[in-house]
Image (cartoon, rainbow, N blue to C red):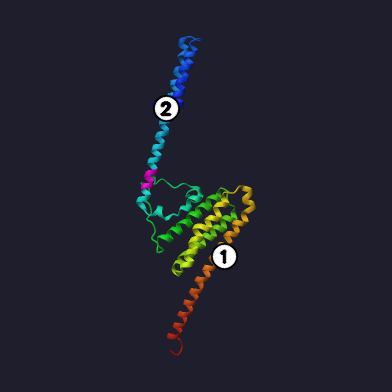
Amino acid sequence: MLRSKWGLASIIIGYSAGYISTFFVHDAIALVFPILGTMLASVIRNAERKVAQLAAERDAANAAAAAAAAGGNPQQAQRIPPAVQSFGGASRPGGQPAANPAVAAPQQAAPEPRASDLGPEWDSIMEYIGTIEDMVLLEGEKNNLDNEIVQRTLSLLVRLNRIIPQLVAFNNGDINHKIKRLVLKDLNGAITPFLHLSGEAKRQNRRLLLNSIRDIDNQITTYTSFIEQKDLMELRNKAELIHQRYGAGN
C-alpha cells in the first residue's frame, strides 16, 4: 500500500493522462503515461521506505545512547537544571556534537564520574556553570557574543568554579542561597535575553550585559573578602596560640 498521497496521485494522473491520450494518439503510446505514473509512485514509495528506515535507525541509536547514559550515571538527568534548555540544548565547546556512546563504546570505555565532596546540589551547580561556559564559547564562535563579553563571562565562570568549594566550606546559608540564585537565575537571565536580540540591538545594548557581568563579579569579590576575613581570623588565632605555647619565655 502506498503511504504517500503523492505516490497515489502520480498513478491517478498517469492513468488519467493515458485515458485521455487514447483519443489523440495510438494506444501503445497512451500506455506510456500509466507506466510512467506507476514508476514514479514506486520511486516515491522506495524513498519513503528509506526515510522510514533511517528514522527507525536514528531512534534506535538515540534510545541506545540514552540507555547507555542512564546506565553510566542515572542521576545525571536530575542534576542539570531546567534552565539549561533556554540555551538551546547542551553543546560542547566549538559546537561539536557529542559522540554516539553506542559507537564510541567499543573504542574507548566511558570515564568514571569524578567523586565530589560538595554534594549533589552543588554538583548540579558546577555542571550548570560548565553548560554556561560551553554555551558562551559556542555563541562566541557564531558571533552572537563579541570577544569582550565572551572573555569577561569566562573569567567570571572561572572565579565561580574557584570560590564555590570555599563557600561550601564557609557554610553560610545566606551566601550559599545567593550564589545558587546568581548562577541558576541571574547570570542565565542576563545572557539569554541578549542572545535573542538582533545584531543592531546587541551593539546598542551590549553595555547592559557587560555591566551585569561586572556587578556579578563585584558580588563574587565581596564573598571572597568574607572568606579572606575568616581565614585571617583563623590565622591570627592560631598564631596567638602558637605564640602562647612556644613563644619566648615559655
Asked if 105 appears above or below 47 in the picture, the reply is below
Quarter of image, res 218: bottom right
Circle 1 SS class:
helix
Rendered location of residue 122, percent (x, y) = 43, 61
Residue 168 magenta = no
* Quadrant occupied by the N terminus: top left
Q: Mark 2 points at which residue?
A: 45
Q: Looking at the image, which residue sits at the far left?
A: 71
Tag 2: Cα neighbours inside 10 Å, few (<14), some, or many (≥20)?
some
Rendered location of residue 132, percent (x, y) = 50, 55
Rendered location of residue 250, percent (x, y) = 43, 89
Q: Mark 1 points at which residue?
A: 218
User: Is residue 108 among the parts visible in the rendering?
Assistant: no
Rendered location of residue 26, percent (x, y) = 48, 9
Q: Looking at the image, which residue sits at the far bottom?
A: 249
Residue placed most toward the observer, 221 or 8: 8
Residue placed most toward the observer, 166 or 93: 166
Choose the circle earlier in sequence order: 1 or 2: 2
Question: Mark 2: which amino acid?
Answer: Arg
Circle 2 SS class:
helix
Question: Mark 1: which amino acid?
Answer: Asn
Q: Main secondary structure of the magenta part?
A: helix
Quarter of image, res 114: bottom left
Residue 66 magenta = yes
Identify the residue shown where x is 53% and y is 58%. Answer: 186
Query: Magenta stretch?
Result: 62-67
User: Is residue 110 among the parts visible in the rendering?
Assistant: yes
User: Which mark, by number, is residue 57?
Assistant: none
